[in-house]
Amino acid sequence: MRADVHRFSLKDPSDVSGLTEAIEKGDIDPGKIVAVIGKTHGNGLVNDYTRGYLTLCLSQLVGDRRGVPAESVRKRVPFVFSGGVEGVLSPHYVVFTVDPDAAASGEEKSLAIGVAFTPKLSPSDVGKQRQIDATAEAVIQAMTRAGIKSPDDVHFVQVKGPAFTTDDIVAAGNAGLTCVTENPGKLMGFGRAASALGVAKALGELPANEALETAVLRNFDAYSSVASVSAGVEVCVNEIIVAGLSRTWSGPLTIAHRAIKDALDIVSVTDLARDLGLSPAPQVPAAQARRIRAAFVKCEAQRDGMIRGRRHTMLNDGDIDQQRHIRGAVGAIVAAVLNDTALFVSGGAEHQGPDGGGLIALIVEKMI
Amino acid sequence: MRADVHRFSLKDPSDVSGLTEAIEKGDIDPGKIVAVIGKTHGNGLVNDYTRGYLTLCLSQLVGDRRGVPAESVRKRVPFVFSGGVEGVLSPHYVVFTVDPDAAASGEEKSLAIGVAFTPKLSPSDVGKQRQIDATAEAVIQAMTRAGIKSPDDVHFVQVKGPAFTTDDIVAAGNAGLTCVTENPGKLMGFGRAASALGVAKALGELPANEALETAVLRNFDAYSSVASVSAGVEVCVNEIIVAGLSRTWSGPLTIAHRAIKDALDIVSVTDLARDLGLSPAPQVPAAQARRIRAAFVKCEAQRDGMIRGRRHTMLNDGDIDQQRHIRGAVGAIVAAVLNDTALFVSGGAEHQGPDGGGLIALIVEKMI
Amino acid sequence: MRADVHRFSLKDPSDVSGLTEAIEKGDIDPGKIVAVIGKTHGNGLVNDYTRGYLTLCLSQLVGDRRGVPAESVRKRVPFVFSGGVEGVLSPHYVVFTVDPDAAASGEEKSLAIGVAFTPKLSPSDVGKQRQIDATAEAVIQAMTRAGIKSPDDVHFVQVKGPAFTTDDIVAAGNAGLTCVTENPGKLMGFGRAASALGVAKALGELPANEALETAVLRNFDAYSSVASVSAGVEVCVNEIIVAGLSRTWSGPLTIAHRAIKDALDIVSVTDLARDLGLSPAPQVPAAQARRIRAAFVKCEAQRDGMIRGRRHTMLNDGDIDQQRHIRGAVGAIVAAVLNDTALFVSGGAEHQGPDGGGLIALIVEKMI
Amino acid sequence: MRADVHRFSLKDPSDVSGLTEAIEKGDIDPGKIVAVIGKTHGNGLVNDYTRGYLTLCLSQLVGDRRGVPAESVRKRVPFVFSGGVEGVLSPHYVVFTVDPDAAASGEEKSLAIGVAFTPKLSPSDVGKQRQIDATAEAVIQAMTRAGIKSPDDVHFVQVKGPAFTTDDIVAAGNAGLTCVTENPGKLMGFGRAASALGVAKALGELPANEALETAVLRNFDAYSSVASVSAGVEVCVNEIIVAGLSRTWSGPLTIAHRAIKDALDIVSVTDLARDLGLSPAPQVPAAQARRIRAAFVKCEAQRDGMIRGRRHTMLNDGDIDQQRHIRGAVGAIVAAVLNDTALFVSGGAEHQGPDGGGLIALIVEKMI
């Protein structure tokens, strides 16, 4: 098997010209697309409809070119979009393709991709044990499909789970179901948290008897160092994409990751770039930066209102949501090091990397 | 003469506990305070009243301790506050003191500070030749007071000019005066631009015959590499603070600056840190970072909607002002390098540094 | 001919369940749809993609049901969506259908609808004479199609024109074209203004020799009392919908309009309701309110920062755009009188109704 | 005793020119000021510092004129400011004065004012029984001071309680105290709710055995129809102002109130105006509107996301807080009826009026 990764810029959330051209040129076989991850123009909060808009446009494009309905594409291919391109960040999407017929490359490990879906989740499942366990099972399924045997070879697990509006939450209540909170934005946080604990459970980062709903948004020592979770109103299951390394795959790409300790942790970003043979001194030179195929970052505003002993104001701001603040800040630091602004930077890193920090995963072309 | 610089954190815009304590301990003689620069909690736009609030509180404190009315303090001491501590940035203020009786240190140059004020400016002066010329004269006056002879020894010129609300602009119109624009936010931009050209004129960065109102917000090749201009409703003149180096001053502090070429220019930030003997690799170690006494940054969203070939969305955002975006982004990059979040980062860098970029000035303790 | 008007609520900008059901029940023949107007969830500013999202979803639905491509539906049917449902306002869309075979009803006038399009407009046409004149011609064409002979019988003209992002404006500049402004949000205002003057020219509200680009955003005494103009990135021509009364049409619906003098002008809203046989005392009773089929409102924040002698703050707010403020305010007043929150309320009323005010048009079932 | 009420417009949050002039003219004796209530320019959320800024400026003015320190003024006089003048609303403040020596007017009841304070409240008291009970005791104390015997004669109880930032909440946690929530904005809501239940308890609107912390933000059938509660970081006790009617007071003013049933309840606003002899048909004529001395409104976004069967979007909005939406909407409705925009409109009506609604109180000159 052989994985490839293509990144396209996005003029607006309906702009699928990049993938269209790649298909028309023969660079991408639409039948081999297994997942899409991207950053869209919206606010990344509950009322962000740019995620669904791009999902619709891309799934219709792929469906058209494959001669199948868009709905059936969406059942098979996760489209994981996170809104919010604050500051220097640039809207874009990353298309993952898999050629199942390519030969393994022998000793060298290459990028491996696997995809899976949980059953449908209702508002009352979000943040609860059912979401933790369903996510863990789907992660194991995706690893198996990717031929990744050791959790150590998993470098990035993207989860996209459902968000619900007041409408849905009220309807669930009327149907006798109990949600962990009635606040739509807060429910998104519970969902990200439970899903991350599900990843940690699957990968053994957390013993099963600690991956419990009682830990959700409470025990922040419990986390996965490779989980990245987004939520959006446009999906109703947890969609799972596992990216790692395997000798059963071939191809020009590799992946690595690092935890981010706090919002100023430029050192881990630089170290990760060096792990992959890049030379950030302090910035990856433009010629080298072309080796970067995709970058995924999770981050969050530190809960105690401080960063390295000084106050930040992100948690008290009534005008700009804390997620928009932190994406803009950490996104800029990573962009400055990598010399690249088309980064997937997602806020809300509950149980995704160390508390107050997050994580970064990079897919790059192997050095020759 | 001898200059000193003290930085205090700010819990809220009325929190003057830091300076109060320093005065009570005898660390600062209130009679020697010549200027204050800081970042407050507001949005940094027209309706930001946190700047005026802190000005009131600090001027009353200084007045109380000196036994003079707050108003007379404000006439002598510029209080330059810029709102907006997006992302990792931390609210704070920097107090400049001058001891006129200290002996010069001989060969070595030390931090030198000079202050001046323009006459009162009306809404119809903003963005026009009168603001350019009045600013240029005041800069020269401040240099003279600072004993700085060569423009090459000027490393930072902070200007705080007036902003006007719709109220004021309408009143000016009714009085027969013509403003360059009726939009209060846009008028702030014109004022910053004209003031920056005034600094450039004073320092010879721009020939006098090019420092014209016709260049304002038009000829972006014309700029000052040391001017930092803010505007706010709480002042009605241009207040000028010149910071540079002079052999007639002594003391433990030095200053340097660099232009910032664009929003990803981490290289210039790192180089400036190295110029001053710090070791950013990629981050200044915490122990070294204690040498930093103040950092001043100007930045702006690139006018063509691109950064190094990729789109940004700052100029199209109807929810978050472009200045809030860019302060959060560039502020984070500088904070990550300097290992310090109490930075004065100000947006709206019209004619302040290269177009699409800005500048950074650092005051640090000299190496021993 | 016979016009009908159907209003559907909108759970999210892709929710076309209302029209789908109406088509499936046989209540609406998709081939008879001539126009759609609605309010979507976005901010109503440049970066509002909910308008395009709903346009895509609805045009695909209609195309599917008619067996033609969505693109060809969009060329024939204006989809005019305005973002921003602040305060009590409710997202919804209104579908206009025309049965060309229905007999005229004789003496009584009934609702008449006509549609037309201008040629393509570039960023450099916006706010200029070409947009004024092209709009005027299209309005006359739409009146003719609607069989409305007297301008007095025109009660509402909806125009949707193009908005452009920084991207487009820069590209136009590079191609040697000059835009009236480089600010995307401001360009939207110029476009609304010129289009409104085009409507006024077509209807004789303004002599041709005063409907000039020199009047755009300058002479606010020049206005149309029936023009409602929105702009959005999802169109590149001015789409025109003329609604009025004609004896050549039959059906159960009628339309009327009133100018709104300022943001507190509840009297005109109440008077209009009375004109149409409703009893607002002060609120239209729920049973009567069911006669309301659609309501269209334009409004704007008064330019001098005052309303009836007291200051408002809408023009100085850096956190919430003035259009969002005024839509929420005037929308609530109209909603309270009409007992109906599914109102099309659009900000930016340049030359649309009296300066500082706007207009309201109501389509209701005739009294029996 | 005799109460008077003076309303002043506010150019910016430091503008005390209105009261200054009234004192200088002899219209107001600064020694007789017992309370000030107003609306300032901020966002009305946690990071709104305009409330504290105006409090500082006004208390200094009053202190100066009385020859006492501002701090001692603030201990005796509640300064209750709510941020947020969305839409048509106009920043202003209302000064209450009491002349203790005026004779009672006999049979006719007149406006009566009483003031009291609770002990200091810590973050861990907010939303809990201690806040309910301390508020109830202070309300009874204020009624006694106002000489109001029957709860039926109480028409408005304004409470201003403390808000806390993340800083404070973390500090409380470190000190071993438990707060009901760690979210600063949510803690404001708990505080408003508990304080309102305290008012309901004091006035017998709720039996003591139901005015329990278990009802806070849970049992929304429990409410006070006269309580209006705001919270802000600038106070650390609950400040109570009781306004009602009493025969032991004389003077030209009277007060009345009505519950507001939901966000469209223009009927109750109109009815209240009629109760007081005004003629809203639909708008109070300008000449009559001059009788209005102050208007106080509480309102909130309906919790189920609906208003009269149609969706609203206020609870899902990540860009504009729900309180800003609802203040702008309900404020506009009240302003349109009363022909007056200088209204105190405050969001967050937890247990203040019917769920999803709120209340309105009006102080007007008696009819002659």
Image: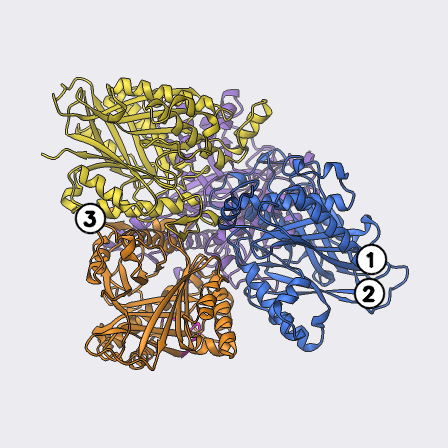
Chain colours: A yellow, B orange, C purple, D blue
* Residue range highlighted in magenta: B119-127
Q: Where in the figure is residue A143, as x and y percent of width and height? A: 28, 20
Residue hosting label 3? A283
Q: Which residue is mark 1?
A: D147
Residue B228 versus residue D366: which sits nearer the camera?
Answer: B228
- Quarter where residue A258 is shown: top left
The extreme left residue here reads: A368
Same chain for labels 2 and 3? Say yes or no. Answer: no
Which element type, helix, strand or loop, lies under badge 2? loop
Q: Quadrant of residue C80?
A: top left
Disc 1 and disc 3 on one polypeptide chain: no
Q: Main secondary structure of the magenta part?
A: loop
Q: Secondary structure at mark 3?
A: loop
Within 10 Å of disc 2 (Cα), the crowding (few <14, some 14-19, many 20+) is many
Q: Nearer the viewer, residue C68 or B3?
A: B3
Residue corresponding to mark 2: D1
Q: Name the kind of residue labelled 1 in the image.
A: Gly
